[in-house]
Amino acid sequence: MVPVDLPLRQTLEQPDTPIEWVYFIERGVASVVSQNAGRREIEVGIIGPEGMTAISLLGADDRTPFETFMQVEGDGFRIPAARLQLALEQSDTLSFALMRYSRAFHIQVAATSVSNGYAKLEERLARWLLMVADRVGESFNITHAFLATMLAVRRAGVTLALQVLEGRGLIGSSRGSVIILDRPGLIEASNGAYGLAEREQRRLLQPPEPRATSSSTEPA
């Protein structure tokens, strides 16, 4: 693995293209984005320091239909996909750990689908802001235009939703930056859209319990 800078909008995976590199993000957030025939984009998942790109490799697939790129700049490490696959064949513990992350990520994707289908825009936005804050801290840079793309709504709708959350004292927003002021209040504003995937991620990614050891004494 080699260290790499991960600037804003850097592409980490291209759709329908063999995966050459796997990225482990140390700082920042990447978006996994789906694009329809009309070239309209919507975010289906995010990846931060908890995980990795190229999750399809864990399912014996060398490509993905989605694009992955950095939405909050940072840095991390990358490794050739072929080397990671070799390491997975040689290490059961590595394979187990990454499969657990894959499960957590797919639960996040399912929760995003439910949120997109049922939650109001303010609730979806609250969830998204909390998810990013979980990975980069309570203050980060993001533009209204980018948020509109990620949530598949008009920019004016995102601006209004941000104003609603700001008016309630939950966030501060100015010049392309957001700061979380009232995390419990923002969780409440998500109306249940935030929480399930996060709970499952904690369960799946927590360190395994140490195995009990027994000692025996030879009879005298």
Image: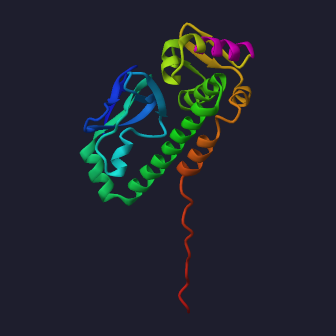
- Residue with the most extreme front position: 37
Q: Quadrant of residue 208?
A: bottom right
Label count reads 0
Quadrant housing residue 170: top right
Horizontal and vertical percent position of residue 120: 65, 26
Q: In this view, which residue lies farthest toward the top?
A: 175
Query: Does residue 73 appear in this view?
Result: no
> Residue 7: x percent and y percent?
38, 21
Q: Nearer the viewer, residue 162 or 212?
A: 162
Residue 201 x/y as whole percent = 56, 45
Q: Was residue 148 drawn as part of the magenta stretch in this picture?
A: no
* Figure check: 209 above or below 6: below
The structure residue drawn at horizontal position 49% and vertical position 49%, both measured from the top left corner, is 103
Is residue 164 rendered magenta in the image? yes
Here the colouring is rainbow
Question: Which residue shows up at 59% across the image and 42% down it?
Answer: 197
Q: Is residue 49 left or right of residue 212?
A: left
- Residue at x-position 52% and y-position 18%: 147
The answer to whether any part of residue 116 appears in the image is: yes
From this view, report whether residue 160 is shown above or below residue 50.
above
122 or 201, which is in the foreground?
Answer: 122
Quadrant assignment for the N terminus = top left
Q: Is residue 50 left or right of residue 4?
A: right
Q: Position of residue 19 (x, y in %)?
A: 27, 38
Report the side of 118 relative to 99 (left or right).
right
Q: Residue at x 40, y 27 (%)?
A: 36
Considering the image in quadrants, where does the C terminus appear? bottom right
- The residue segment tinted magenta is 158-168
55 or 156: which is nearer to us? 156
How would you classify the magenta stretch by its main secondary structure? helix
- Residue that lies at the very extreme toward the bottom in this rendered image: 220
Q: Nearer the viewer, residue 82 or 155?
A: 155
